[in-house]
Each structure stands twice: as structure tokens, then as C-alpha cells.
């Protein structure tokens, strides 16, 4: 649905995007993860034709964002945490306003179902709604025409746990029943771990990881070693060992290509005085933190 190659964007002296490469495949939920200022929103805005890139190529539904026409936008739903809403309108007025833009694509029965599911007060002004209700109204106005591609930029930001759970449950139900393609940026690793099919991790304007969640969970492990005596950090380590830390007799690192049959053997090859070897699975939050630490260390070494 979306292909991004070598995307670059600079704001004065700040290089926001340094050659981003990313794919959002059809029929999957792709989560876009990264810390504040990593380039998530800038990438999404370039893809949604809200910002002009300096270099690179983007294809959305097979065309450049600048060439997206009305028939393309009728297949795209976009919701951002910073989206400006006509707050003087009620929920019903908002729907009456956007409905004609989508013609026969707009599904009134689907609209009414989401109104009920989201428990939105139709005749309340948007300015009087809570943040969670506003996000639900934005989502409703962007989904009632059953888009094929749904782009969500930090939809959970500022939502309380109950509203977030309702929001996520509704989104999951819709994506499963409709077979939509979803591209979602989020800080909420626990939520992403529940519903994403793929994950792309961006930091300092570069995508450092892009893979199916099942494969990521399969190959990432936290490895903890206990040695018989204190040892200095070895001069060379396997490339797939990252976020390496050694303190006295204890060693801890992330193995990004863990293999149960060979891991212990490899650890013995590096540490002849190995006494105990333990490896445990990692959740997305732990993987993200480990990658972020490694990238920060590499930047410090090269700067």
C-alpha cells in the first residue's frame, strides 16, 4: 500500500529524515515505533502529502503523494493526534459535513454502528468532548467510508486506559472484519505488541528494524551469563550481540539472532570461564529499548 525509499527531510540545520526506507504491505497492521523526534510524524506527513520531502520516493496506492486524487483519498483514512477539528460543530454536524465528500463510499449503517460502539453523543459540540471522545469522532469520520488504507499517527496519546482499551478493541475488530491495511505510529509498546503484524523502528531519522512481529519475537533474546571470575569486555563480539554490558562476573546482552542450539556453544567460545547461561524472550518494549541503547552507543563512538 505504501512504499518509501531513501526519504530525506531537513528543517534548517536539523536532519529529520536521513534516508528512510519503509514498506506498508496490504492487509497487515504495521506499527511505526520511535522516540519523540525520531521522524515518525514527519515520515507520515510526507506520505500523506502534508509536507514536501527534500529527496526520496514515496508511493501511496501506487502514485506519488502529490498526485493523490479524490478517488485515492476515498480509499485512505487518516487520523493524527494533532489533527485540527471544527470544534464549533457537533458530532452529527461533522458527519454531515464530511459525508458528501465520499459519495457512495460512505456507509450510513456502518456510521450508525460506530456511533453506538463508540458511545458518541451526536448533538454535543466537539469542543465539549473529552480528548478520547474527540479521537473517536475523528476515527469515525475517517472510517465510515470503509477505506482500504488507515493511517493513524499517535492515536493513543493522552487517552486514559479505559478509553484506550475501547479505542483499540474497536480498531482491532474493524481491521479484522474489514481486512484493512493499517499504518500506526505509537509510543505504547504494550498495545502495539497485542495487535501489530509488522513493526518498523525509527530513530534519528533512520529505520533500524522492519520485520514481522512473530519473527522479531522468535529471534530476539535477553541473554544473561555468570562467569567463574571477573573478566574484561572481549575485544570482539558477535555482530548479533547488542546492548552488551559486563560487570564483574555478570554479563548481559541482547542476541538479535538467537539460536537455542548454538547460543550456549557460542557463549562458551567467547567466555571460557562461563558458569551459567540463561536466555529469555523479550517483549517489544524491551527490544525497542535495547535497540535504542545500541544506536546511542554507536552514535557516541562515531561522533
Image (cartoon, grey):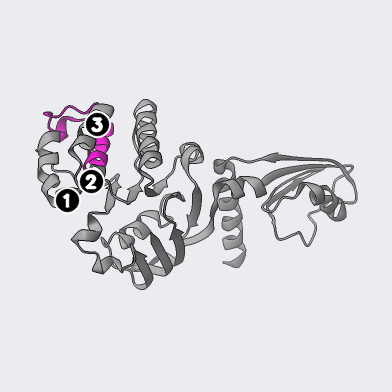
Q: Does 124 lie within the magenta span?
A: yes
* Residue tagged 3: 113
**Other-residue count near label 1 (Cα within 10 Å), few / some / many at <14 / 14–19 / ≥20:** some
| Labels in figure, total | 3
Please say whether residue 129 is visible from this viewpoint.
yes
At x 85% / y 51%, what residue is drawn? 265
Residue 171: percent from left, percent from top: 36, 38
Mark 2: which secondary structure? Answer: loop
Q: Does 22 lie within the magenta span?
A: no
Q: Is residue 113 left or right of residue 195?
A: left
Mark 1: which secondary structure? Answer: helix
Residue 74: percent from left, percent from top: 22, 54
* Residue tagged 1: 102
Q: CA distance from mark 3 to mark 1?
A: 18 Å
Q: Which mark is residue 145?
A: 2
Residue 128, compared with residue 257, is above or below; it is above
The magenta region covers 118-142
Contact between labelled residues 1 and 2, with CB atoms less than 8 Å apart: yes
Residue 77: percent from left, percent from top: 28, 49
Q: Is residue 226 left or right of residue 188?
A: right
Q: Which secondary structure class fits the magenta region best?
A: helix
Q: Is residue 270 left or right of residue 18?
A: right
Q: Nearer the viewer, residue 258 or 235?
A: 258
Q: Quadrant of the N terminus?
A: bottom left
Amino acid at each position: 500500500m505504501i512504499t518509501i525509499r531513501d526519504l530525506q527531510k531537513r528543517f534548517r540545520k536539523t536532519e529529520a529524515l536521513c534516508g528512510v526506507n519503509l514498506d506498508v504491505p496490504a492487509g497487515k497492521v504495521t506499527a511505526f515505533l520511535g522516540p519523540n523526534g525520531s521522524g515518525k510524524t514527519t515520515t507520515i506527513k510526507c506520505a500523506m502529502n502534508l509536507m514536501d520531502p527534500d529527496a526520496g520516493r514515496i508511493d501511496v496506492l501506487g502514485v506519488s503523494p502529490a498526485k493523490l486524487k479524490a478517488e485515492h483519498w476515498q480509499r485512505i483514512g487518516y487520523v493524527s493526534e494533532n489533527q485540527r477539528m471544527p470544534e464549533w460543530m457537533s458530532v452529527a454536524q461533522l458527519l454531515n459535513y464530511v459525508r458528501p465528500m465520499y459519495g457512495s463510499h460512505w456507509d450510513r449503517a456502518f456510521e450508525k454502528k460506530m456511533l453506538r460502539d463508540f458511545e458518541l453523543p451526536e448533538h454535543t459540540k466537539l469542543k465539549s468532548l473529552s480528548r478520547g471522545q474527540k479521537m473517536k469522532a475523528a476515527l469515525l469520520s475517517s472510517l465510515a467510508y470503509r477505506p482500504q488504507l488507515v493511517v493513524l499517527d499517535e492515536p493513543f496519546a493522552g487517552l486514559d486506559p479505559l478509553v484506550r482499551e475501547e479505542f483499540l478493541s474497536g480498531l482491532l475488530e474493524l481491521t479484522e472484519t474489514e481486512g484493512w491495511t493499517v499504518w500506526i505510529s505509537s509510543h505504547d509498546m504494550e498495545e502495539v505488541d497485542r495487535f501489530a503484524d509488522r513493526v518498523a523502528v525509527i530513530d534519528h531519522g533512520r529505520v533500524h528494524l522492519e520485520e514481522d512481529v512473530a519473527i522479531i519475537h522468535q529471534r530476539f533474546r535477553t541473554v544473561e551469563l555468570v562467569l567463574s571470575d571477573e573478566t574484561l569486555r572481549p575485544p570482539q563480539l558477535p555482530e548479533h550481540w547488542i546492548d552488551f554490558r559486563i560487570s564483574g562476573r555478570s554479563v548481559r546482552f541482547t542476541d538479535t539472532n538467537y539460536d537455542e542450539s548454538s547460543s550456549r556453544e557460542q557463549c562458551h567460545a567467547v567466555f571460557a570461564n562461563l558458569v551459567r547461561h540463561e536466555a529469555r524472550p523479550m517483549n517489544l518494549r524491551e527490544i525497542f529499548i535495547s535497540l535504542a541503547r545500541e544506536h546511542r552507543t554507536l552514535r557516541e563512538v562515531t561522533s
